[in-house]
């Protein structure tokens, strides 16, 4: 399908007393469309995340990228320097799983209120720390299609502490696709194997994709970008969302 014409704007998602800044992209005409939540890397809702959000909207979805550091650093957006990396990690270490889940649910609820958005199931896609958060968010009942890209720490911990996120695998409600690089220094191949084993154990609909690539291979703004891996992963994401969110 050819990309649709889209419009974009910045919106506010209410979660109790918290106002979450979010980037919204949607087709200009027609609808209703399925909704997709895009979950940032540690670098904020930066130009790469906005580009991914635009691309998803162009496929015929209403896509929204909430600022998951809103509680810590409103407006946070950086690039990919070493200093940016350190700052992003600092904020990542201050997040907690309950707050992240609450903010993502609030974002889904925002989508539900839009006239041009179909009701559940919704989709989610996340990268880097957002890949971990997306795996966590897969436990939310509204999510039917989950694309988790190179989320480190899924089998070793969870934001804010507590049992590792992988222990929540039985709670996953939808179909999960995981994308990993076999050369990723942050995610040993043995951990990817553990994730796949847990998904198989609990009969969660899933596919795990392994590419000869390193961390961040999907981001064309990073030195780690791998064109072949990124293009194949994008093809898989398109198929996942089409199958689970549109039934096509």
Image (cartoon, helix red, strand yellow):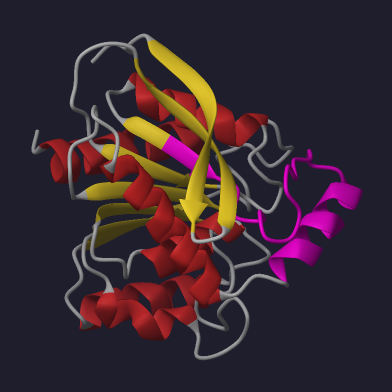
Q: Quadrant of the N terminus?
A: top left
Residue 205 lies in what quarter of the image? bottom left
Identify the residue at horizontal 24%, vertical 43% (top origin): 240
- Tell me residue 77's x, y (percent): 74, 40
* Residue furthest bottom as drawn: 163
Between residue 71 and residue 227, name the one nearer to us. 71
Residue located at (50% from left, 85% from top): 164
Locate residue 177: give its quadrant.
bottom left
Quadrant (top left, top right, bottom left, bottom right) of the C terminus: top left
Q: Is residue 33 left or right of residue 38?
A: left
Closest to the observer, 181 or 143:
143
**Is residue 211 rendered magenta in the image?**
no
Which image quadrant for residue 181? bottom right
* Number of numbered discs: 0
Relative image position of residue 192 (x, y in whole percent):
46, 70
Q: Position of residue 165 (x, y in %)?
A: 46, 79
Q: Nearer the viewer, residue 247 or 217?
A: 247
Placement of 50 over or under 161, stated as above or below: above
Which residue reaches farthest right?
A: 83
Q: Is residue 70 magenta?
A: yes
- Which residue of the protein is positioned furthest toward the front in this rendering? 17
Q: Residue at x 19, y 50 (%)?
A: 121
* Vertical comparison of 30 with 104: above or below: above
> Going by the image, does 126 lie left or right of 241?
right
Of residues 182 and 5, the one nearer the viewer is 5
In this rendering, position of residue 134 left or right of residue 41: left
Q: Position of residue 204 (x, y in %)?
A: 20, 71
The span shown in magenta is 64-93
- The answer to whether one can see residue 121 in this image is yes
Identify the residue at image location x=33%, y=12%.
Answer: 28
Q: Tell me if residue 236 can be seen.
A: no
């Amino acid at each position: 399908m050819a990309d649709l014409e889209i419009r974009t704007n910045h919106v506010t998602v209410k979660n109790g007393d918290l106002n979450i800044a979010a980037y919204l992209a949607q087709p200009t005409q027609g609808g209703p469309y399925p909704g997709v939540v895009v979950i940032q890397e540690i670098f904020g809702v930066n130009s790469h995340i906005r580009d991914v959000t635009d691309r998803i909207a162009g496929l015929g979805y209403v896509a929204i990228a909430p600022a998951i550091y809103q509680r810590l650093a409103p407006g946070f957006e950086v690039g990919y320097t070493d200093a940016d990396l350190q700052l992003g990690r600092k904020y990542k270490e201050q997040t907690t799983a309950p707050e992240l889940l609450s903010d993502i649910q609030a974002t889904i609820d925002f989508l539900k209120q839009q006239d041009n958005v179909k009701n559940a199931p919704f989709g989610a896609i996340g990268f880097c720390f957002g890949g971990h958060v997306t795996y966590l968010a897969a436990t939310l009942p509204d999510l039917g299609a989950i694309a988790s890209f190179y989320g480190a720490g899924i089998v070793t911990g969870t934001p804010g502490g507590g049992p590792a996120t992988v222990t929540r695998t039985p709670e996953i409600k939808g179909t999960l696709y995981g994308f990993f690089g076999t050369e990723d220094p942050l995610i040993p191949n043995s951990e990817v194997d553990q994730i796949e084993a847990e998904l198989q154990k609990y009969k969660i609909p899933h596919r795990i994709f392994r590419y000869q690539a390193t961390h961040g291979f999907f981001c064309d703004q990073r030195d780690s970008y791998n064109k072949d891996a990124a293009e194949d992963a994008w093809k898989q994401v398109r198929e996942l969302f089409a199958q689970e969110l549109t039934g096509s």
